Image (spheres, grey):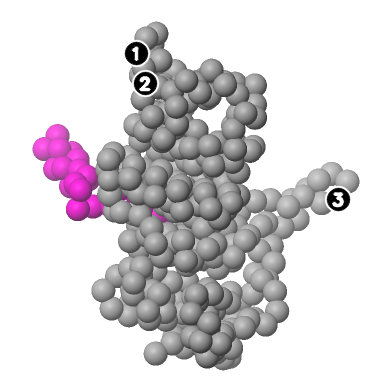
Amino acid sequence: MAEAARAHLKRAWTTSDPLLSARGLTVWFPVSSGLLQRTSAHVHAVDGVDLEIMQGETVGLVGESGCGKSTLGRTLIRLIDPTAGTIEFRGEDITHLRGEALRAKRREMAMIFQDPYSSLDPRQTVGDIIGEPIDIFGLAKGRERQDRIYELLGVVGMNPRFADRYPHEFSGGQRQRIGIARALAAEPSLIICDEPISALDVSIQAQIINLLERLQSKFELTYLFIAHDLSVVKHISDRVAVMYLGKIVETAPGRELYSHPRHPYTDSLLSAIPIPDPLVERGRERTILQGDVASPVNPPSGCRFRTRCPRAREQCADHEPPLDSFGPDHQAACFFPLD
């Protein structure tokens, strides 16, 4: 009994530990073919990812479309079941939770979806959309529930009187605010932001980013911010993880990554960011990648980026590079990193 108690104490979570951590996280989707629809291959959407998110920080997750960013985000909060690996939240292994145990844990996690036009039920009023998490977790009823919905609308900068309206009556930016209010309804500590501004007008994007930052400060939230626009990620993120074809290829604090990238893929992404100064823009050298992203059904051997990498050598095809350290909190998976 004493040994069991000591083991429990060793697993006790503290704020110096990661709020969420993944180890060897893998998600493969079967590909069926033939008359009997037998599984003939797998899409390697996420393939052996290690990731830690500390309480109160914003981790940016970037990469090209189809690299597995959204799948990783949804798997971390168990909207998708992992094929292999482990997920821990507040020190508890949630990889195989089911039923009521998983539902209780999900109260601490939420998601803001990419498309505000398809992520809101058109048959529900705004009040019902925001109130749904409140009802699911039994947080409030009657007048208290209504007051909570009005409060959440005010928090995201919308008139509480909009609670009786329907999603089609609002613009894209307003709908995303409604989605954010819904994400906040159950008072989560972790929110997965799955490209929350990519479907919005540029003039609205900054408003949503500023809103997310204010909410993080007000409610002590932790974000995983998924995006393909590195300029946006630079503004909001404390740390950045770069993903390519199901793998994390580089992680670093935001400023360090942008000023001193080590992985050639990160360098190519950064070189694509336009600079507002025309003189600097004309004078800089861009890294242009050749070819297309390889198929996740049959990824390349060794380093998955090698088929497009200007620094690739024979070693890159024979072995998969590990995430090596290049200073405090800076890691990159490359045999021939940038200086």
Q: Name the image quarter holding residue 289.
A: bottom right
Q: Which residues are magenta?
A: 1-23
The residue indicated by pointer 3 is 34
List x then y, in percent, for residue 302. 56, 78
Q: Is residue 89 above or below residue 187?
A: below
The image's mark for residue 53 is none
**C-beta proximity under 8 Å, tags 2 and 3:** no
Quadrant where the C terminus sits is bottom left
Amino acid type, callout 1: Glu
**C-beta proximity under 8 Å, tags 1 and 2:** yes
Q: Nearer the viewer, residue 72 or 27?
A: 72
Q: Nearer the viewer, residue 70 or 125?
A: 125
Asked whether the viewer can see residue 67, the reply is yes
Q: Nearer the viewer, mark 2 or mark 3?
A: 2
Asked whether the viewer can see residue 47, the reply is no
The residue indicated by pointer 1 is 144
Distance from disc 3 to disc 1, alpha carbons, whole Å, reads: 56 Å
Residue in the picture at 39% in, 62% down:
235
The residue indicated by pointer 2 is 148
Q: Is residue 122 magenta?
A: no
Q: Is residue 7 magenta?
A: yes
Residue in the picture at 59% in, 65% down:
64
Whichever of callouts 2 and 3 sits on the residue coming sooner in the sequence is 3
List x then y, in percent, for residue 313. 56, 91
Q: Is residue 269 above or below residue 120?
A: below
In what element is the residue under mark 3? Answer: loop
Side of 22 relative to 31 (left or right): left
In what element is the residue under mark 1? Answer: helix
Amino acid type, callout 3: Gly
Residue in the picture at 59% in, 41% down:
172
Q: Is residue 338 above or below residue 133?
A: below
List x then y, in percent, for residue 38. 78, 48
